[in-house]
Image (spheres, coloured by chain):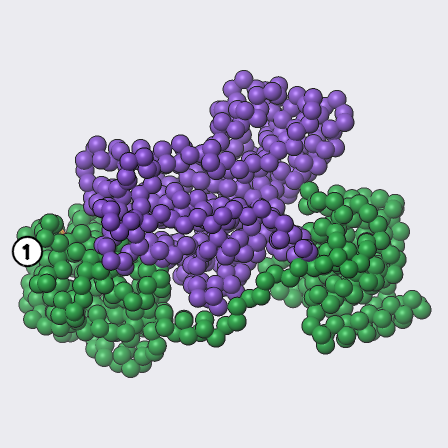
Amino acid sequence: MGLTLMEGNEAIGWGAMAAGCNFFAGYPITPATTIYNTMLELLPPKGGVCLQGEDEIASIGFCLGASMSGMKAMTATSGPGISLYSEQISFAIGSEIPLVIVDVQRLGPSTGSATKGADGDIQFLQWSNSGGLPVIVLAPVDVKDCYTLTMQAFNLAEQYRCPVFVAANKEVSMTRETIDLDALDLPQTIDRRTAAADRPFLPFGVHEDQLVPDFLPIGGERLVRQTSSTHGTDGYITTDPEQIGAIQQRLDDKLRRNIASFTYYDEYQVPGAETLVITYGVTARAAMTAVKKVQHTNAKASLLVLKTLWPVPEQLILEKAASYRRVVVAEMNLGQYVRELQRVLTDKKIDFIGQMNGELIKPGQIQEVIQHG
Amino acid sequence: MDSLLNSNRPPVFCPGCSHEQVLHALDQALLRMGFSGKDIVMVSDIGCSGLFDTFFNTHAFHGLHGRALTYATGIKMARPDLKVVVTMGDGGLGIGGAHVLSSCRRNIDLTLLVLNNFNYGMTGGQCSSTTPQDAQVGSGFLNKLEKPIDICQVAGAAGAAYVDRISTYDKGLVDGLEAALSFDGFSLLDIWGICPGRYTRRNKITPKNIETDLAKLPGLADYKISNARPEYGRAYRQEAAKLVPAGEPVRIEKSCTAPQSGRMEVVVLGSAGQRIITAGELLCLAGAAAGCHAAQKSDYPITVMRGHSVTDIIISDTEIEYTGIQNPSVVIALAPEGVNRRKKMLAHLAPEALVIKASGIELPSCQASIIEIDCKAEKIKSQDWALVALAVLAQQNKVLTMDMLKAALQLRFKAGQYETAIAMLEKAVVSLGNT
Ligand code: SF4
């Protein structure tokens, strides 16, 4: 037992290692570069691979090839890199390639500010793929989450064969904090389910009651086909609407139907409160201070911190908000996730506080909205 | 086995398409080399050349336009034992140019077959990066204005050791493919051919023309010598084997006690080269040594050795929630560059706050108490000012104690460095105290 001083990005690297990551490729970009630095220090001496691609497209491409060859792969970038990843992300979704993608968000749009934080990619991460299928997005609040949610991200990528995003923020990733590594509540490591040798194998075929195909690596005894084209269960192009429709529906179902098993959140309940603050990421920290500050006043509020952002954990949000009259939403953009909450919580009064100026939202700003709307 | 081709999926190229001849020649070459389907990965991208993977009974990876080399690189690094063959048209070559150049530079053991037919067959015969300027293609006059690329010279210049060009109609095609496939490193074979579906409708091109045109191009043999070097994957693994695995992250046990409880915010304002961020880290380590939570955020320009350097530290015996600075207990002001970044904050300091400032630094008027340190007069190097300021703070028993500072220095510095730093600090504190 003792404290370790660690940056959020380093914790992402150590969390990846704990989850069994053995392949990383990235292209340097502030504020994500220190993930690459960490992986370069950790992976090659342990027999893993860490590569620097010629650009972001190559970096994620390396990961897709390695993942299909059986490796547990991660890449990390910031908003400008996510833009370049976009086509490969669609590929990973449609062709069920496990991959962890860390987006250390910085102030956009475009080049924006390399060293300023934001949560401006929250809708982009969900909708940056052509076809609009669901993705998993997890949002860390602090250095602890950077470690554990990265592990969860690997587990989910393996379990559901899909890209999983860790939506970090410069303010979490490049802040050094003390962490008690030995006190972390770490998940069991999960590996992708491989096809049993005595069962028939189709690259995109599922057995009854399964929503995720068994995996076999490229290069094994049985031939594996991977393709970015619309495919049937055999991995060959198909034009059969029935087969196409069934596979697309399964891609949607495999995440949406299982959302309850990966709905991560924190809460701080204040008895007698009529207001619920809902937030995520680094803003949750200011919200916690604000909520504690007013908890003995008349304008008290509880706090719900979402750590799974996509698919939207609607059930959880409905349950947790049920007893409150009013919801306050705070996020470091001009109003992105609040749209989802407005969609889900149709009968609540929703007050919003957003900010996009490179600064953290202050506890006082949230307190103000709790107290005065 | 007499073929690696997929008997269930016969080729479906347009009649007379050169791709089909290359397909059979590649099958022959791979068989001759003794490969079976499970030893091979066919990696392809978009366009008619992208149909290759479906016609082979091998492992297959069919991806995005121009990106085949990126997947192939990941596959080869993961599975060095596999034979990785990449097919790409002149379209993929153009759009994925950066990956071609990097693959040449990297020299990873892949074989890139460029199925070069001078136009985009699949989308209707538009110009590509290899379309001759006098050709009639589906891009109107645009190809007249752009010079076609000779990928072989480009690849050689980019560092590929194996570069060759050949006609689809060359009797030695199987041999040419086998030579490229056998090369231990990145090999590129530029295979010229005819696209009757699109290109020959408006352009006269025959096997004979191709042969004549190829003969006119500069030789490539020199690259074998000038670019010879070890294969990337093997070299990577050799380098990696020399590295020592990183140790587990350091656990800091509580060895001292903080001088006060609650949340303490410290801001250090300086300039590049004053080791401001190291001082902030030391303060965090000192906090951890007293069992406190600590957080540090820094602000500096992308340039080094010039401009401001500011670091914000929070030390607290309770969990740190908000990581912004709200009400600093201590400000250390060592350079105008840093002070300028936080003028507003300085003007609003609380009366209980303490400022330690280097002599000559101008501050906006504020209510905080001020300790001035004349590091210059004491001939303390600018890079040590921040550290000295921490020692002065420890003397005041504010935020940290001397024991905490020593514990931090011990954690951060190597043995020799530690003694030097302690000696420097002790001397500085005494001399500053005398002034
Ligand atoms: S369009 Fe051209 S390249 Fe494509 S299959 Fe037909 S002949 Fe071959």
Shown colour of chain A: purple
Q: Position of residue B293 (x, y in %)?
A: 72, 50
Left or right for B428, reference B145: right
Instruction: Say whether residue A203 is visible.
Output: yes
In the rendered image, the residue lying farthest to the front is A198
Q: Compared with residue B413, is residue A90 higher up or lower down, i.e. above or below?
A: above
Please say if A323 is above or below A278: above
Q: Amino acid at mark 1?
A: Gly
Residue at the right extreme, as displayed:
B434
Please identify the quadrant where the C terminus of chain A is shown.
top right
In the rendered image, residue B216, in percent from the top left (x then y), is placed at 15, 74
Q: Badge 1 sits on which subunit?
A: B
Q: Position of residue B324 (x, y in %)?
A: 69, 45
Residue at 35% over, 47% down: A193
On screen, residue A296 versus residue B217, left or right, reads: right
Res A338 quadrant in image: top right
Colour given to chain B in the rendered image: green
Outermost residue on the top side: it is A347
Residue sitting at 33 percent across and 71 percent down?
Answer: B107
Horizontal side of A367 relative to A313 (left or right) equals right
x 71%, y 44%: residue? B319
Res. A235 visible in picture: no
Image position of A337 (left or right of B185): right
Q: Nearer the viewer, residue A110 or B78?
A: B78
Q: B397 or B360, which lies in front? A: B397
Q: Quick one: SS at disc 1?
A: loop
Mark 1 = which residue?
B16
User: For mark 1, does the 10 Å Cα neighbourhood hold few (<14), some (14 to 19), or many (20 or more) residues?
Assistant: few
Residue B302: quarter of image? bottom right
State whether residue A319 is above or below residue B201.
Answer: above
Q: Hey, which quadrant is residue B320 in on the image? A: top right
